[in-house]
Amino acid sequence: MMTRRTAVGAGLAFTAAVCTAGFGAYDPTARRRGEVLAIDALLIDESIAMPRRMLTFIEANKRVLPIVGIGLDAAAQAGLRRLFGQSHAIAGLSSGATLFCLERIAWDHGFRLTERSGQCARDPSDHTCRRELAAFLGGAYLSAASPSPVARAYRPSRADGMLHAWVMQKSGPQFRRSRQEA
Amino acid sequence: MKLPPNVSEADFTSALKEFASIVGDQWLFTSDEDLELYRDSYSPLWGEPDERTASAAVAPDNADEVVALVKVANRYRIPIYPISTGKNLGYGGAAPAISGSVVFDLKRMDRIVEIDERNAYVVVEPGVSYFDLYDYIQEKGLKLWIDCPSPGWGSLMGNALDGGVGVTLASYRSHFDAQCGIEVVLPNGRMMRTGMGAMPGAKTWQQFKPGFGPRIDGLFKQSNYGVVTKMGFWLMPSPENYATGVVTVPKFHDIIPLVDIIGRLEQSKIVQGLWSLSSPTTGTPAFAAHSGTSSMPTDPKILAILNSPDGVDMNKLDVAANEAGIPFWAANFNFYGPKKFIEAQWDCIRDALGEIPGAQFKLNEIRRLPLPTAELAKMRDLGPLGIPTLRTFDLGPMISYEGEDVVGHIFFSPVIPRTGEAAIEAMDAFAAIVRKYKLPCPPLQFPTAIFERAFLFAVGLPVTRSSVVNAKVREILRELVAMAAARGWGEYRTAPAFYELIMDTYSYNDHALRDCLNAIKDAIDPNGIMSPGRYAIWPRDLRDAKG
């Protein structure tokens, strides 16, 4: 049976492959921009328990999409830096607290939060969350015309410990590509 | 277009054009969308007219560009506000001290200029984060450790300049004290190096702090007098082993001899790792002020006393804890170094604290470093092991205050005497305020020994997105500051909304310190461009305008 740990472990293994050899079989140039939102990777929060059927859904997507386990530690930072450098759009499933941190790290790499579902936090059933995430991955939600980035930005709340599904796209300046040599 | 104070639209437009010619159009930010990222998401003035917001931001790539930008700013008298990575949450974030300032965003300058394993130092640019340096040291296999604060995404330089602290050995914990050598661009655009760095080709810039003549490094703390572009830091050699040890003492008032004896051990450099107070009786863990979590005790008598609506009667609690056989205090120690050195330190602690009747001792296993990765993954706080994380954010605040989501915090950060008496007084005074305003934090919070000779009693107050609730919180902070000042306790650091409030408490001899700092400001920065208003140091024209 697929467990959360094995799903995340698989994600990390994929991250390692991405980090050492680029996206390999996954060709970012093949993204069909203008038609649907092509997601380069699905980020899964390691710090939060994932509903069982969500794990099945994530496992199913592993065939077509890099699954990346994310945490708030030093090891994850190095991987994230490389991932941000090589991606244009990412989707994720994380706690609000992780999203708050990740969003601020992503800003430095030119990413902005373009979609965020509060459905998962409000109704943490497998079904709701899965449907939202599937919609993001399928490109059903192209960058919506929110009035300002603040309207989309994650704000800490009582729902910090709950699941949030989200999409970030690269659209701003990339302050941090790879660390500069002196 | 938002304008800086006392700057015409024509001058501002010309200055922005010159900024862009130096850094490239893509590194000058003036759109609302880009400037949103320079708001302080923990601002207690969010959305109010007094919220500090930038008019523009500019991101240079190197020190030469900083020199050119400062010269332009000085010519047009544009107030600038340097930030390193801008993640100083709780103390202002990336937002300037006064609205209309141009943020100098230095995070592109992320070069590790020099690292010397033999002499254990590093020279970094402002954009180098604790994560970056840790990663670099691991990648190169250097036998060096960093001392990092609890979110590790900040800049070494930014944290040091703002008075930040870490959690390993005493001599590395105060990050500004651990610096050795500064390169700074003065307000007229002239670059200067402090200490031995003032000598061209100096070989000891990062080895000898005093240099020749007056030591002026401290003037550049908080960026009132220049843009710091490089800074050297002393690093800690990787220790061979790590261990924790716990000493418990039975009675509430045992905190007095406990703090005194540990203080003597620290002054003698026998205790060098950070130690922290916790209470098995109240369930308050070490660093409760930061973690906000506690494990409630299960003894019914103790619970009843802790939950009393009139506050906790420590005498009753003391008796109940004694009857239940639960020690009141625990001192938690961290040890680093050779096994025999750790054992010798522990022997000294046992000998000294053994004078307190009923003291119990437990030295945990001395572990060879580095610890296995799988084990590190399960630990909540890796700071004492020199590893940066963001785990402090783990589950966010997840609390409300006055019916509003808490979105962040501002710190009340008084420095109190390193005595058990002062600790008791601070705990009582703060608990009374928590009860009075029903604040969403544990009423019993303990001071931390993070500074070498004084206690820090840092408490996070809730910030919401409601201006009404935030106004109330600002008033609570004012009350806390007044309460602390009346006892002779001053804040070491604060959020921009309270710069004036705190500076006003440092009023010895009719504000002689503030007046001296302002006089230096007028001499070094006559056009008042450098971080005006930061920590309430103002250029002459804005002082006059404020009356």
Image (cartoon, rainbow, N blue to C red):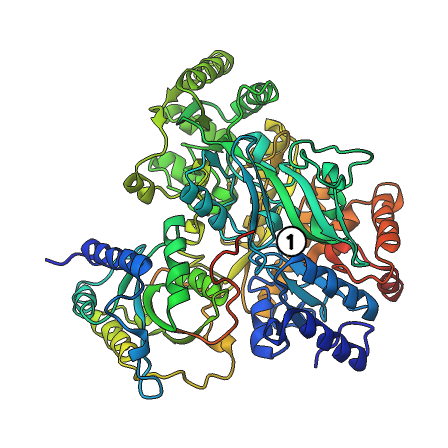
Vertical placement of residue B490 versus B410, above or below: above
- The residue shown at (37%, 70%) is A87
Vertical placement of residue A30 versus A22, above or below: below
- Which quadrant is the C terminus of chain B positioned in? bottom right
**Tag 1, which secondary structure?**
helix
Q: Position of residue B202 (x, y in %)?
A: 70, 37
Q: Is residue B375 visible?
A: yes
Q: Nearer the viewer, residue B134 or B46?
A: B134
Mark 1 highlights which residue?
B477
- The residue shown at (43%, 23%) is B248
**The quarter of the displayed image where residue A50 is located:** bottom left
Left/right placement of residue A55 relative to residue B209 reads: left
* Three-letter code, disc 1: Leu
Q: Which chain hosts label 1? A: B
Crowd class of label 1 (few under 14; some 14 to 19; many from 20; radius 10 Å): some
Residue furthest to the front: B201
Residue furthest to the left: A1
Q: Is residue B443 visible?
A: no
**The quarter of the displayed image where residue A117 is located:** bottom left
**The quarter of the displayed image where residue B93 is located:** bottom right
Q: Position of residue B428 (x, y in %)?
A: 58, 38
Q: Position of residue B97 (x, y in %)?
A: 70, 61
Q: Position of residue B440 (x, y in %)?
A: 49, 54
Left/right placement of residue B413 relative to residue A95 reads: right
- Which quadrant is the N terminus of chain B positioned in? bottom right
Vertical placement of residue B344 versus A161, above or below: above
- The residue shown at (48%, 50%) is B132
